[in-house]
Amino acid sequence: MERRKFIKNCCYTAIGLPVLATVLESCGSIYYASTIRKESQIVLAKSEFIKGDSQSSRSFVLIKDKASEFPICIYKSDSNHYVASLLECTHQSCELNVGGGVYSCPCHGSEFTMTGKLLEGPAETDLKTFKIDTDNENIYINLY
Ligand code: FES
């Protein structure tokens, strides 16, 4: 390998490793929670927001239900308030990504807050959200 090409490859590796580590770290924060389906409700244990080390908690979890091709993100906005948003872009139905405190669309760039409010188009409407009830142990996501 030529010296110049070797140095160039070393530079790409040196730059690429921290970027890759950041990407992998952010991927690690995506957590699909276990749920129970009861008729028109999805039951999610509040304990799903606690990380395995019990020292820290998640600000959101994703759930997948057979009734929808899109995941639902349950965002914990404060100690006992949750928002469930369907991760289907309201522009042309692409599945949204979660990261950096927003939902972003990989298709045309729309962005939404973690509570489902439109931040930036081309989408024109907020995300579909679901009514939520809670008790001491569980979160109940009402699908209908
Ligand atoms: S489908 Fe999401 S911005 Fe177009």
Image: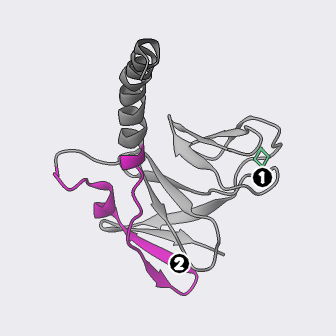
Name, please, the residue furthest toward the top.
4
Q: Which residue is drawn at 37% across and 20% down?
A: 10
Q: Nearer the viewer, mark 1 or mark 2?
A: 1
- In the image, what residue type sits under mark 1? Thr
Q: Residue at x 45, y 12 (%)?
A: 4
| Residue 29 seen from this side | no
Assign a secondary structure to mark 1. Answer: loop
Q: Name the residue under label 1.
A: 90
- In the image, what residue type sits under mark 2? Gln
| Residue 10 seen from this side | yes
- Magenta-tinted stretch: 27-54
Q: As drawn, is 77 to the left or to the right of 115?
A: left
Q: Name the residue under label 2.
A: 41
Quarter of the figure that contains the N terminus:
top left
Coordinates of residue 11 in the picture (x, y in percent): 41, 17
Verify whether residue 111 appears in magenta: no
